[in-house]
Image (cartoon, rainbow, N blue to C red):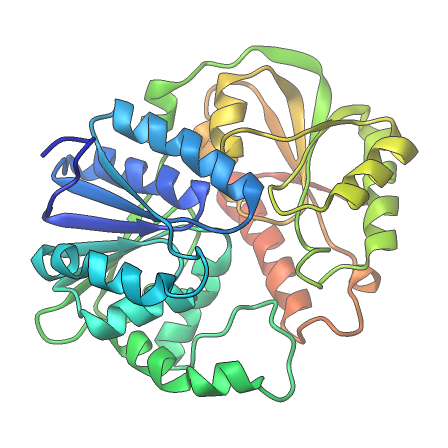
Amino acid sequence: MTAADPAAAANLAFVESPVQLLNVLEWSHHTGRRDLTVVVLSPADPMSRGQLRRMAGIARDEGVAVRWQEARAGRGSLPRTLRDLAPLLRAAERVIIGDPFSRYVQLLLTLFGPRALTVVDDGTATMEFTAQLARGERLVRWHRPGGLRPPRELALAPVTALARRRLAPAGRRSVEVFTALPVEAPPGTTVTANRFAWTRARFGPPRLTRGADLVGTSLVETGVVDPDRYAQAVAALAAAHGATRYFAHRREGVEKLHRIAVTTGLEIVRPELPLELIARRGPIGRTVLSFPSTVVHTLPPALAGTGITITVCAIAPEWLRATSSPRARGFLAGVTESARRAHGLSLTGA
């Protein structure tokens, strides 16, 4: 099997974001399993596609077979994708996924139940996924607003229900969660810690700058945080900590970033790779400020031994939109507190 011509492999990964692909590489490094094919179910977002293209190149350099699948290329792409991937799915002994909430992944799981399943991180959703699985609840993203379920979600409810069963250990099927996040494993599920050993071996150590860097978040774009409150918080943090750069999340809007640049003077950086790799390569500030997100759990192991201080800025309740999910406040507070406990991170307010 060659990276240029992916064939059936014992381990088959489906990724839809750059971070998922990074964590699949970490899983492969940790387990020593090289019989791996990665299928990129390409997203529509240009920033995500660009980062995925670059991550795919790194994966190929590591000897991993990568298949780019235009899974969202308009009408007919879904049945074509299912037809193209059917032979790989039937032959795979283990399937690795990054987003159990993805409708695409859920549909694949309902059509082809894997013998063994591994879930890698794609953000803090891993924490909610394991909690919902343990409680036997339907899979719903934590930032999804409450109220009536939309027609599309109701129509896909049977798919989601079957996928949830396929995501749980049963019979001969084993389930592993490979994660850098603090999670409680549902009964029968194995949790393996992701220490970012591949990232630390492959990149760095980074060159440090004297200033502070601020990590952006897509909480405004997902409808959780009010945009005005967010802009004010960024300005306050930059002034208090002497931040000079703002590392934008790949989903952050252009108008929002322009507003931040104009009002704060921060240099807006659009990372070409996941932040864990960018930070490890450097240059990076001696202090990294972040709102509660995945990076408050992934940057500490990725930057271990570099002398970089990571500080979490808690989300104040008044920043939340009235339409945000009832679970949003508690979930974000949990991310903040778990980062403080797990990594000894300091907290700051805006």
Task: Name the quarter where the N terminus is drawn.
Answer: top left
Between 306 and 38, the residue placed more toward the observer is 38
Horizontal and vertical percent position of residue 158: 35, 86
Residue at the limit of the structure toward the right, as seen here: 263
Above or below 186: residue 203: above
Residue positioned 18% across, 39% down in the render: 31
Question: Dividing the picture into quarters, in which one does residue 315 lie?
Answer: bottom right
Task: Name the quarter where the C terminus is drawn.
Answer: top right
Residue positioned 77% across, 39% down in the render: 257
Residue at the limit of the structure toward the front, as seen here: 75
Residue positioned 34% across, 19% down in the render: 202
Q: How many labels does the image show?
A: 0
Left or right: 316, with 9 as reference point: right
Left or right: 219, with 204 as reference point: right
Above or below 227: residue 323: below
Left or right: 258, with 73 as reference point: right
Residue positioned 66% across, 60% down in the render: 222
Question: Dividing the picture into quarters, in which one does residue 138 lie?
Answer: bottom left
Between 58 and 292, the residue placed more toward the observer is 58
Determine if residue 221 is in view.
yes
Above or below 248: residue 94: below
Horizontal and vertical percent position of residue 327: 63, 72
Horizontal and vertical percent position of residue 334: 59, 59
Between 316 and 85, the residue placed more toward the observer is 85
Horizontal and vertical percent position of residue 47: 57, 40
Between 88 and 337, the residue placed more toward the observer is 88
Question: Dividing the picture into quarters, in which one does residue 220 lie?
Answer: bottom right
Determine if residue 295 is in view.
no
